Amino acid sequence: MRLLLILLLTLAPFQARAQAQPLTVFAAASLTDAMQDIVRLWVAAGHPAPRLSFASSSTLVRQIQEGAPANVFASADEKWMDVLATANLIAVGTRRDILGNDLVLIVPADRPMHATIAPGFDLSALLGADGRLAVGDPAHVPAGIYAEQALRALGLWNTAAPHLAAAADVRSALLLVERGEAPAGIVYATDAAASKAVMVAGVFPAASYDPVTYPFAIPKAGDTPEARAFLAFLSSAAARDVWIQHGFKVK
């Protein structure tokens, strides 16, 4: 009996630390600013601060597939969430579409211009002979995939393709334009709104690319009551206000 009591007393601090273990949240790079603001509200409500990991949705999916611990995953498109669902890596019943976004053309703020983006848009004149068009890598980054869809639909892909500066995620594409390393880029409207160093030159027609949808879910390996509470919080009235403030379309 005495030995059992000693064992229980020894294990108690470890159990307490396990229960207090903060959440790990994997989120698409375009969610960075809004997610950080929502986490501040979560912490103010008395919860431990989650660990946040921002990257391209494709990168985060690969990490989850390889066993990286994540309690909540927020993707920038349905495709990459489908990959996890097909592999049976998503907790049943937790997937939900929370947000939407728009695709825009940006230029450095100190070189302002405005354009109507439609078939026949003179992209060559904007980029010049050697200018690069900053985009998320169309091979795997959702923002880049949407960008390719739009450019193809408008008949601009053959002009754009030789000029692409394919970035690891949408925030990296934004950074190239912020630094003046690319005269133009294609990002989400929310990314453009988050930067004072760029301006929106034009908005891509909604019909030229698939609707930008952000599905959120809980990876099966990270399914805990706290994870489910945080996922619910991301759809709460308080979170909704933050999403809207950052320019997202709330579903």
Image (cartoon, rainbow, N blue to C red):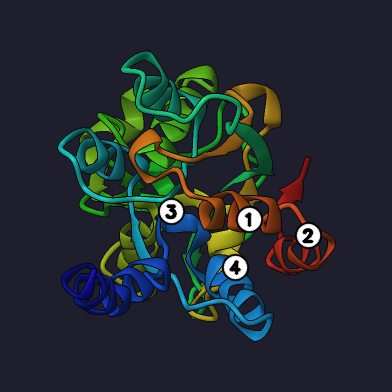
- Residue highlighted by disc 1: 229
For the residue marked with disc 4, what is the amino acid?
Ala
Residue 90 visible (yes or no): yes
Per the image, label 3 sits on a secondary structure element best described as strand
Q: How many marks?
A: 4
Marks 2 and 1, the one that precedes in the sequence: 1
For the residue marked with disc 2, what is the amino acid?
Arg
Residue 240: which disc? Answer: 2
Per the image, label 2 sits on a secondary structure element best described as helix
Q: Is residue 17 left or right of residue 156?
A: left
Per the image, label 1 sits on a secondary structure element best described as helix
Q: Is residue 250 left or right of residue 182?
A: right
132 or 48, which is in the foreground?
A: 48
Q: Which quadrant of the figure contains the C terminus?
A: top right
Report the Cα–Cα distance between label 3 and label 4: 11 Å
Local crowd size for mark 4, using a 10 Å CA cut-off: few (<14), some (14–19), many (≥20): some
Indicate the position of residue 64 as horizontal and vertical percent values.
26, 40
In the rendered structure, are the residues bearing label 3 and label 1 in contact, judged by CB atoms less than 8 Å apart? no
Marks 4 and 2, the one that precedes in the sequence: 4
Residue 27: which disc? Answer: 3
- Residue highlighted by disc 4: 34
Compared with 172, 139 (above or below) is above
Residue 112 visible (yes or no): no
Marks 1 and 4, the one that precedes in the sequence: 4
Compared with 144, 226 (above or below) is below
24 or 106, which is in the foreground?
A: 24
